[in-house]
Image (cartoon, rainbow, N blue to C red):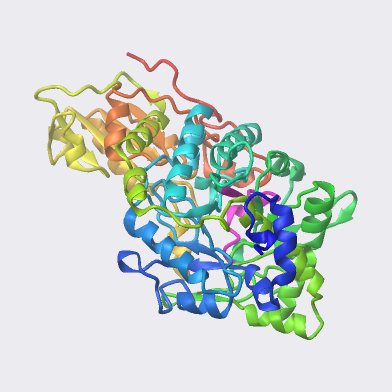
């Protein structure tokens, strides 16, 4: 007789209730770990420890009974589908053939950062979330639906996004994946995004979303990111905790499948007149159980951010465990505190033996394991993974990065360009005999305007694409990938650009992965635009007017670093006398 959990027509809760008592302790514990995995050449499984993965694939699946994996590098769409199928086939060899849930950080834009996101390789390429936020909700919905189709085609069923933190401190290096600094705009964008990925309700054609980082990761002290020990503190000098919480309230009401707390530890925070313990949010019972579970009524999956229990050692560098406020605790004690806080799953960890020992020595009751295992299993049933976890390699090759998807992403890129100033250079139409000088972009793309010349003084117009300013750092693992520190351009660069503008009309494109200080540039550049995830060809399409640029700033542009340093970290768009306000675009460029 077919057991209830193998009967597709039954409700997910009933199937989960039937399966859970059948599982061994090892299987239940395996559900509660969610770590990095890598694919091999030609879509094969990797049977050695990889650059970032800690164990061979068969070890984590067959020995540790794990079945939630955050995939990093992928091959072609066909190879990605082949790898997903191989992974699911391996999972079929376990006692109850629990299918794998494959997750990913965003991988449809430009930023390659193994700690946060991946550039689109094979997938259609779109603006970063900040760039999407510069557009209309219809553009966000189109992106989400296409990204969902491409994820489904290669077997990715869990999106470790959207990131709905309010980018309240302009210095914060993680804000490129947010929807900006406006809470209302962020909430609208998030609701559209969730609808595009999950559909009206979670089901076999959904990609489940883990909305992050609860209860809002934007107010980092001095704008430093909580990946690193110097950025562990979140502060609320303006008393705006509820503002940062608002998008998560809406996400819960809209049915987000999961939530992820951030690494940060709140400092000086009081809720309902009660001081909140100064420990990282995933260790914080006041935040996870009392606020999220009890007050907000969230009963979905809570997965911690990565590596709270053990240090991460890879590529010759170390990143200390993000056990902020509990650094003095042992790994076992940290694990106990995460469980007591109310989290379901340990992100970036595979220390199943540690949790098994805690249960077997009666430090963690089996009932606590069952509570989280139920949520994790039910989500698999809701996604239809127990009924058919496999994908079609041929379909993946046709769907992922298709011409139609690429064209939609290209159009969004060009449309997201935000014109800030223009002294009559736009639209810059192609013209016979026109000579152009470029920096920071390919000459091939620039040839659409005319002949590319090597010296600005020989050109009719100069176009310079500037990377975002930041202070280079490279001591800790991943640190070089997070652009933090000063928002000022180096004085030598500003001086050189000024000399170009003195001889040649100058267009500057500023990468706005953070709100760069543009004050010196607008003094001499004839045109300044801002972008966040726009290819060279898409920039040409926008500046030439072929695809009209219509982006709006997702945050204000401060006038100076002094103004940034004097503004409270938790109050968005609060610098004095900003150069450009949030939502700005030049509506009618001068002609």
- Residue at coordinates 25% horizontally, 31% vertically from top-left? 502
- In the rendered image, is residue 95 in sight? yes
* Residue extending farthest right: 273
Residue 450 among magenta residues = no
Instruction: Looking at the picture, tell me which residue is in the foreground, 567 or 73.
Output: 73
**Where in the figure is residue 190, as x and y percent of width and height?**
60, 38
Instruction: Looking at the picture, tell me which residue is in the foreground, 527 or 393.
Output: 393
Q: Is residue 432 above or below residue 32?
A: above
Which of the 4 image quarters holds residue 124? top left
**Where in the figure is residue 232, as x and y percent of width and height?**
65, 62
Instruction: Looking at the picture, tell me which residue is in the foreground, 509 or 205.
Output: 205
- Residue at coordinates 21% horizontally, 37% vertically from top-left? 445
Residue 222 among magenta residues = yes
In the rendered structure, the answer to whether residue 506 lies left or right of residue 161 reads: left
**Where in the figure is residue 541, as x and y percent of width and height?**
28, 29
In the rendered structure, the answer to whether residue 359 lies left or right of residue 198 reads: right
- Residue at coordinates 72% horizontally, 74% vertically from top-left? 334
- Residue at coordinates 76% horizontally, 84% vertically from top-left? 360
Q: Which residues are magenta?
A: 208-228
**Where in the figure is residue 448, as x and y percent of width and height?**
18, 31
In the rendered structure, the answer to whether residue 591 lies left or right of residue 250 reads: left
């Amino acid at each position: 007789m077919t057991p209830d959990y193998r009967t597709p027509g039954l409700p997910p809760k009933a199937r989960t209730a039937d399966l859970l008592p059948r599982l061994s302790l090892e299987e239940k514990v395996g559900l509660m770990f969610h770590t990095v995995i890598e694919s091999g050449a030609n879509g094969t499984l990797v049977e050695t420890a990889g650059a970032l993965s800690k164990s061979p694939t068969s070890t984590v699946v067959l020995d540790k009974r794990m079945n939630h994996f955050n995939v990093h590098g992928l091959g072609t769409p066909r190879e990605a589908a082949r790898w997903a199928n191989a992974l699911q086939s391996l999972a079929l060899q376990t006692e109850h053939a629990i299918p794998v849930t494959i997750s990913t950080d965003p991988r449809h834009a430009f930023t390659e950062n193994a700690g946060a996101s991946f550039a689109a390789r094979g997938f259609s390429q779109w603006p970063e979330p900040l760039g999407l936020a510069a557009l209309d909700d219809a553009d966000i919905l189109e992106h989400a639906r296409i990204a969902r189709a491409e994820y489904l085609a290669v077997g990715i069923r869990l999106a470790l996004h959207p990131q709905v933190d309010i980018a309240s401190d302009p210095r914060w290096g993680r804000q490129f994946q947010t929807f900006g600094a406006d809470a209302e705009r962020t909430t609208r964008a998030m609701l559209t995004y969730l609808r595009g990925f999950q559909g009206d309700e979670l089901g076999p054609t959904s990609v489940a979303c883990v909305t992050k980082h609860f209860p809002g990761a934007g107010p980092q002290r001095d704008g430093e990111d909580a990946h690193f020990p110097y950025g562990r503190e979140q502060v609320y000098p303006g008393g705006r905790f509820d503002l940062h919480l608002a998008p998560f309230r809406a996400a819960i009401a809209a049915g987000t499948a999961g939530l992820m707390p951030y690494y940060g530890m709140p400092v000086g925070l009081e809720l309902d007149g009660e001081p909140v313990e100064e420990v990282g949010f995933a260790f914080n019972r006041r935040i996870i159980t009392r606020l999220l579970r009890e007050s907000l009524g969230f009963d979905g999956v809570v997965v911690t951010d990565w590596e709270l229990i053990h240090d991460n050692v890879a590529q010759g560098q170390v990143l200390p465990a993000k056990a902020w406020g509990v650094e003095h605790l042992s790994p076992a004690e940290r694990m106990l505190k995460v469980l007591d806080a109310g989290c379901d799953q340990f992100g970036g960890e595979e220390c199943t033996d540690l949790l098994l020992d805690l249960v077997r020595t009666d430090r963690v009751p089996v009932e606590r394991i069952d509570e989280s295992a139920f949520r994790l299993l039910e989500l698999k049933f809701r996604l239809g993974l127990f009924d058919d976890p496999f994908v079609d390699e041929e379909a993946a090759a046709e769907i992922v990065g298709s011409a139609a998807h690429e064209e939609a992403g290209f159009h969004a890129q060009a449309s997201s360009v935000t014109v800030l100033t223009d002294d009559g250079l736009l639209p810059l139409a192609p013209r016979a005999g026109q000579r152009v000088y470029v920096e920071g972009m390919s000459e091939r793309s620039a040839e659409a305007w005319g002949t590319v010349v090597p010296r600005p003084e020989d050109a009719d117009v100069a176009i310079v694409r500037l990377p975002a300013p930041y202070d280079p750092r490279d001591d800790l693992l991943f640190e070089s990938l997070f652009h933090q520190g000063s928002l000022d351009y180096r004085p030598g660069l500003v001086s050189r650009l000024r000399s170009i503008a003195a001889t040649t009309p100058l267009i500057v494109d500023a990468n706005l992965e953070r709100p760069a200080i543009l004050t010196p540039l607008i003094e001499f550049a004839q045109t300044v635009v801002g972008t966040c995830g726009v290819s060279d060809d898409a920039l040409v399409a926008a500046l030439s007017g072929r695809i009209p640029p219509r982006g709006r700033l997702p945050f204000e542009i401060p006038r100076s670093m002094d103004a940034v340093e004097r503004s409270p970290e938790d109050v968005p768009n609060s610098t004095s006398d900003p150069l450009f306000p949030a939502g700005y675009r030049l509506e009618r460029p001068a002609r």
